[in-house]
Amino acid sequence: MGLLLALITLLVYLPAVRDGFVNYDDRDYITENSVVQKGLTWTGIKWAFTTVFTNGHASYWHPLTWLSHMVDCELFALNPGAHHLVNVLFHTANVVLLFLLLLRLTGELWPAAFIAALFAWHPLHVESVAWIAERKDVLSTFFALLTLLAYTRYALKKSRVERRASRADTFVPALDSRLWTFNYTLALFFFALGLMAKPMLVTLPFVMLLLDYWPLQRMTSDPWPVSKVLRLALEKWPFFLLAAGSCVVTFVAHIEAVITLQEYPLNLRLANALISYEQYLAKMIWPWPLAVFYPLPNHLSWIRPMVPTAAAVLGILSWLIWRTRRQCPYLLVGWLWFLVTLVPVIGLVQVGGAAMADRFTYFPLIGIFIAITFGICGLADRFQFPQKVIATAAVLILAICLILTENQLRYWHDSETLFAHALAVTKNNHVAHTNLGVTLEQKGELNEALAEYRAAEQLAPELYEIHNNLGNLLNNLGHPNEALVEYRWAVLLKPSLPYLHNSAGMVLAELGRFDEAMTQFKEAARLDPTYPWAHLEIGKLRLKQGRDAEAIDEFREALRIDPDNFQILAYTAHVLAADENPQIRDGRTALVLAIKAKLLTGETQPYVLDALGMACAETGDFTNALEVTQRALDLAIAAQMKKLEPLQQRLELYKNHQPWRESFLATNPPPKKILKN
């Protein structure tokens, strides 16, 4: 049965391997993360375990998740299909583990299979599987289920040992004690790995306590004896200790991203939490519409009418379940599993602007699936429902889930489809507008992207990211003064980010306001001494001022900070190979830097190949200069790049065995060729 579930799950999610990266968290995790892209290195491993204490990358401490992405890049580079496939394989493994766990706990084959199938094919879980950046969901659940499997073996063996030990005439071999101790240690090990994949698992020790009640039946009397509950809780003290440590580390990681009570008051958080619980239940029953981002309501009046309904639904359900706990303990266990495991992400500690997220239900919904499945089985036994009716209903439900999941997977094909769908099914969604704008900008649809950014700015003018995106786009459209306004807003809203100062400085330099630009670049370098781009831009500014020697010093400093940055390598090689000042030129060094940049990028970057051509020409190797520059021109034409005339001019020079010369002074016209005597 487990193999059949796995096979169907693989077939259902196989279309995901045709999808690409998403212009959202995939950028932070993979496509714009140079550390992860280098694969599994000692430097990367150290970074994965210490990043929370440096820059809190992606606001999590989850080193195991980072390592999994590094392994992907080591094996598959930036092939999105392979990254997707790994997510699908983890999800498939989770389906099998859940089936085995429920079978071991209850001994009920068909209920266990049905719950595992619901988990496998419910459309709410598409986000966790189809989104590469949500590797942390499938990975943490993998270790959570292994934890519960090991704990179940421990609890069953210990209960058996205790029953045998309670008989005065029974000898208990020491081997039995070692067996359950081993399983306890194994459960603790898997729990630690799960926390290092995603700290949302901090509530897992409470799930263990729920399983003690049912179906392990380690608490048999009702009301529960306090001493028995305390003993079972103390039994898990190492798990609670790990969970507490994870909470502390997670808070440190999130500290800059946490929204304060002044920004988002407690009454709004409580109201949104109640509504989110109700919405998760509603979307479990009727999974439409689903979106990658649900914007957080910013005023109580938006949600006040929904709060009493949500509170009533949760209150009535909780009361009914509590009243039936003796006859139907699985209802209480499933309900509390759902409520408790959602607590870390329900918004009481609000991080980011999302009201809720489909991915948050990946592990918690197992509890609801347990409650519903065993509840229906109980009703069927009590009222003698025909087995064929129950089986037909189960097959119909699973078939509907499969159809809806296949439909939901289509929206994850690319970023444009994903965020356009989010805008179609939600209101006031600044995140969807922003990310759709990023996607359109990458496609070259700049005016359409500008409209999306403007829409996002109207909805969330307090977000520096939107102003920064607007500044970048306006500058590309040839409106530097308007871009500067946006950059200044971004700096005002988030003065601690060096790249915002750097962007403002670049526009100021473009406008000829060199002193103001230098102030911004130096501030960027002061804020982060490991930020190489500030030194690169200071160097470019020195070139514009005719201070070429000082510029080279800045480029060297940038390369000292980031020696494998192909852009800085290529630009420095460009200057060393082509500067009209013979005291600055250094053809051999330029060649070394350009070759390194080429090795880092392959033959994929026209600018790198162009710099290599300049270096070859400067050292007298015009044959290779012609070859690599022609390749650069071909790539530039294929990419539909503009301003190809300089490349064509350089080719003509190299054919005549003449190198390229260039002045970088701001007072000069565009780069001109100065022939070597």
Image (cartoon, helix red, strand yellow):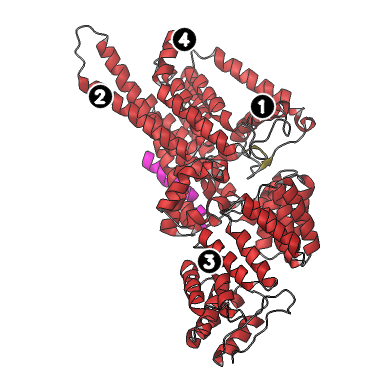
Q: Which residue is mark 3?
A: 566
State the image coordinates of residue 411 (x, y, percent, origin top left): 61, 51
Q: Is residue 257 magenta?
A: no
Q: Which callout, 4 or 2, points at the residue further toward the start of the chain?
A: 2
Amino acid on which the number 3 mark rests in the picture: Phe
SS state under label 3: helix
Cα distance between the residues tagged 4 and 3: 65 Å
**Residue 439: quadrant of the picture:** bottom right
Residue found at x 48% / y 86%:
621
Residue type (three-letter) at the residue carrying disc 1: Leu
Q: CA distance from mark 1 to mark 3?
A: 50 Å
Q: CA distance from mark 1 to mark 4?
A: 28 Å
What residue does disc 2 label? Answer: 178
**x, y percent for residue 410:** 58, 52
- N-term mark: 1 or 2: 2
Residue at 57% in and 51% down: 28
**Residue placed most toward the observer, 528 or 584:** 584
Q: CA distance from mark 4 to mark 2?
A: 29 Å
Q: Give whichever of discs 1 and 3 has the lower sequence position.
A: 1
Looking at numbered disc 4 in the image, what kind of residue is underneath it? Trp
- Viewer-nearest of discs 1 and 3: 3
Left or right: residue 343 compared with residue 91: right
Q: Is residue 91 above or below residue 652?
A: above
Mark 3 residue crowding within 10 angstroms, few (<14) / some (14–19) / many (20+): many
SS for dot 4: loop
Q: Mark 1 highlights which residue?
A: 274
- Nearer the N terminus, badge 2 or badge 3? 2
Q: Which residues are the magenta region?
A: 1-18
Residue drawn where x is 56% and y is 12% of the image: 323
Kindly identify which numbered label has been placed on residue 224.
Answer: 4
